[in-house]
Image (cartoon, rainbow, N blue to C red):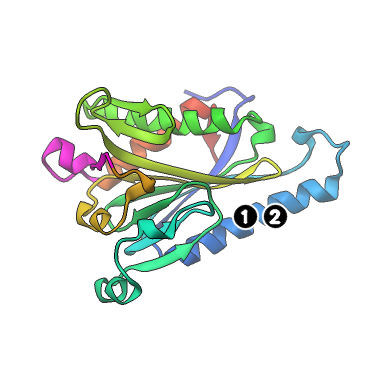
Amino acid sequence: MPLPDSYQRVSFEDLGLIRYKEAWDLQESLLRVNVDMKLAAGKHTLPGEIPTRHTLLFCEHPHVYTLGKSGDLSHVLINEEQRAALGIEYYHINRGGDITYHGPGQLVGYPVFDLEKLRTDIGWYLRTLEEAIICLLADYGIAGGRISGATGVWVGVGSDNPRKICAMGVRCSRWVTMHGFAFNVNTDLDYFGHIVPCGISDKGVTSLRQELGHEVEMTEVKTRLKAHLAELFEYQYT
């Protein structure tokens, strides 16, 4: 069914397995193009008149730890030599949040959206990303939820064993977003054992595979999540 003409258009690209720095540089480039358009247009131009472009990137990364701008380096529990021996890269980056892990089997999403064309509210933006993951989990019969003060999506909320299945951290410049979410699909959870994930020491992490007891087809997960994001943010893919 065709979507309303009022829906935003989003360009989608699946980058596959890509090194973290390469994907980071691509996001920075996309963000800069949009920000430069806004600066050139001037403050009296309406957001809808500026040809900024929404982009959604999906990818997986080789093993890497990333620390947010306000994160605590002590939450990395192994030293540089140990990381190198395990083949894990490390970057201190410009998103919010603390330390997290990216690796094969984890679906990473980087929306580069102009929120002035959607809604100028970072809280709403994060809650909508979370809701897309919660809807995705429901497709697999898993109850996902939120924990107050802990951005991301959890399973086992309200139990004595809450487990994070999706971490989130974003940056926003002139209402243009970058960075995003990391959803554990078939992720090797052992790599979280070398850090304090998101700086939270009293809660665990999990994956879709861990919760279901079997590996999940990544292509299916991507297709379902793309649809949930489009519905919740009210956009269509170009």
Q: Quadrant of residue 225?
A: top left
Report the residue that reaches farthest toward the front: 74
Q: Which residue is mark 2?
A: 33
| Observer-nearest of 146 and 72 | 72
Instruction: Give the x, y percent position of residue 113.
Output: 60, 41
Residue placed at 34% from the left, 43% from the top?
200
CA gap, disc 2 and disc 1: 5 Å
The amino acid sitting under disc 1 is Leu
- Which residue is drawn at the image coordinates 35% and 73% (left, top)? 80
- Tell me if residue 140 comes above or below residue 42 in the rendering: above
Q: Label 2: how many residues lie within 10 Å, few (<14), some (14-19) or many (20+)?
A: few
Pinpoint residue 234: horizontal percent, then vertical percent: 54, 26
Describe residue 72's horizontal placement relative to residue 235 as left or right. Answer: left
Question: In the image, which disc is placed on residue 79?
Answer: none
Q: Position of residue 108 (x, y in %)?
A: 39, 49
Q: Is residue 60 above or below residue 208?
A: below
Q: Which residues are magenta?
A: 202-217
Check disc 2 and give the amino acid type.
Val
Mark 1, residues whose alpha carbon is within 10 Å: few (<14), some, or many (≥20)? Answer: some
Please say if the residues under marks 2 and 1 sit with CB atoms less than 8 Å apart.
yes
For residue 59, what is the image quadrant? bottom left
Can you identify the residue that label 1 sits on?
30
Q: Secondary structure at mark 2?
A: helix
Name the residue rendered at 47%, 26% in the picture: 231
Q: Is residue 126 left or right of residue 130?
A: right
Residue 113 visible in the displayed image: yes
Report if residue 215 lies within the magenta region: yes
Indicate whether 159 appears above or below 24. above
Residue 111 visible in the displayed image:
no
Under circle 1, the secondary element is helix
Residue 106, percent from left and from top: 31, 50
Residue pictured at 62% horizontal, 55% vertical: 30
